[in-house]
Image (cartoon, rainbow, N blue to C red):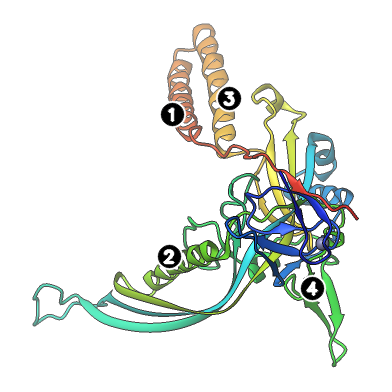
Amino acid sequence: MHEVSCPACNAPTHYDLRDYLLLCPFCSASFHLDFETGRKDLYSDHFIVPNSCDQRQIKSIFIEWIRRLHHNPELAAKEYLITEIAGYSIPFWIISLEAHTQWKGLVKRESANMFDQGAGSSYLSETGMYRRNYRWAISSRRNIAENWGMLNLHEPKEPLEVDWDGFPLDSTLSRGRIDENLGVKVRNEQGVEEERTAYDVREVFDFKFSNSLPILAIQVPEDEALRRARHQIERYHVGLSKLHCDILVDNRTELEVAGIQLIHLPFWFARYIYQPRGLLRNFQKPKEKNLIFDGYAGGILKAEMAIVQRDKLWINTMVCLLAASGCVVMGVTFHGSFMLVAVFCLAVALISGSMALKSGKGGASPLKGDVQPVTSSS
Ligand SMILES: [Zn+2]
């Protein structure tokens, strides 16, 4: 930590100089400090989306979510226990851009040409182009995995596997809503209620808009964010182009960047354990599961389910083992044919047991780093 005076209000305070932008706790100014020359540059394109949720709301959204999933809503509140709720205002570089893609590929013919059987004759060459607009969000944290679920928030409508961490801001912060009353709505000229997006309601950065959430520091510079966004959108568009043809031959994506700004976005994280009341209790230990919410309108962006496939397989194994041993007893006391049923049950138990063992590897573990917020002095 070093003492530096703010270029906007001159107040001296201690900063972590490893951060890319420093935030004045007195006047909320953001500035970059050049190590070599000592030169300070104010950064003005810094905004914040006000946090509009609190712990109580997150808890009630969680309970509503559980009630809708559970076959017995009355029991749900007793069996699910929230162990932790925490919120953060996390910095993202938001890159407004238009992506323009041209693709070339081969499409399989419906019926092969009978007279020309040369190699490749069962494919037709096709080309196409499309353009998309995004406000692409790239985390400005060094450890993008410090909070659970932040690694793959992008959920495209298309059937694609996402292996990048950036996401389109507008479609992400408008999904997963349970409570439609949250979020900011205004009446337009025709008197119809319209929702304002998280981007629309952003304010010039000020600590007060975090509404009690810790503000996380800005660690990654914008040129890196721009490079990452470019790379991620190219990959996304390769995936989109592949949906148009059977063999993608060429794909060219050009980006027209309209602007880049830094926005602190509010997120909430919750952890819960599931303690079943019935038969299930004997088969599984309570394990913590995670949820992530946006703090603008309380949408559930990602959720880990309490009973996963593996747990069901284990239960199946146990039930089949019980049935098998029951049949052995029956076979000994009544009739030998019960032994056949016992063998069958044992086989099913072995199969589901081995499947459970296989699927148990590489499960999602909660991730949390050293999250040290920047604090305001006002
Ligand atoms: Zn200041």
Residue 74 horizontal/vertical position (percent): 85, 42
Residue at the spot x=79%, y=63% of the render?
A: 297
- Image marks 4 and 3: residues in contact by CB distance under 8 Å: no
- Observer-side mark, 2 or 3, equals 2
- The residue beneath circle 3 is 319
- Looking at the image, residue 360 sits to the left or right of residue 249; the answer is right
Q: How far is mark 4 from mark 3, CA to CA?
A: 54 Å
- Observer-side mark, 2 or 1, equals 2
Q: How far is mark 4 from mark 2, CA to CA?
A: 30 Å
Q: What kind of residue is marked 1?
A: Ile
Q: What kind of residue is marked 2?
A: Arg
Q: What kind of residue is marked 4?
A: Val
For label 3, count other residues whose C-alpha is less than 10 Å away and answer few (under 14), some (14-19) or many (20+): some
The C terminus sits in image quarter: bottom right
Residue 235 — which label? 2
Residue at the spot x=88%, y=52% of the render?
A: 377
**Upstream in sequence: badge 2 or badge 1:** 2
Q: What kind of residue is marked 3?
A: Val
- Image marks 1 and 3: residues in contact by CB distance under 8 Å: no
Q: How far is mark 4 from mark 1, CA to CA?
A: 54 Å
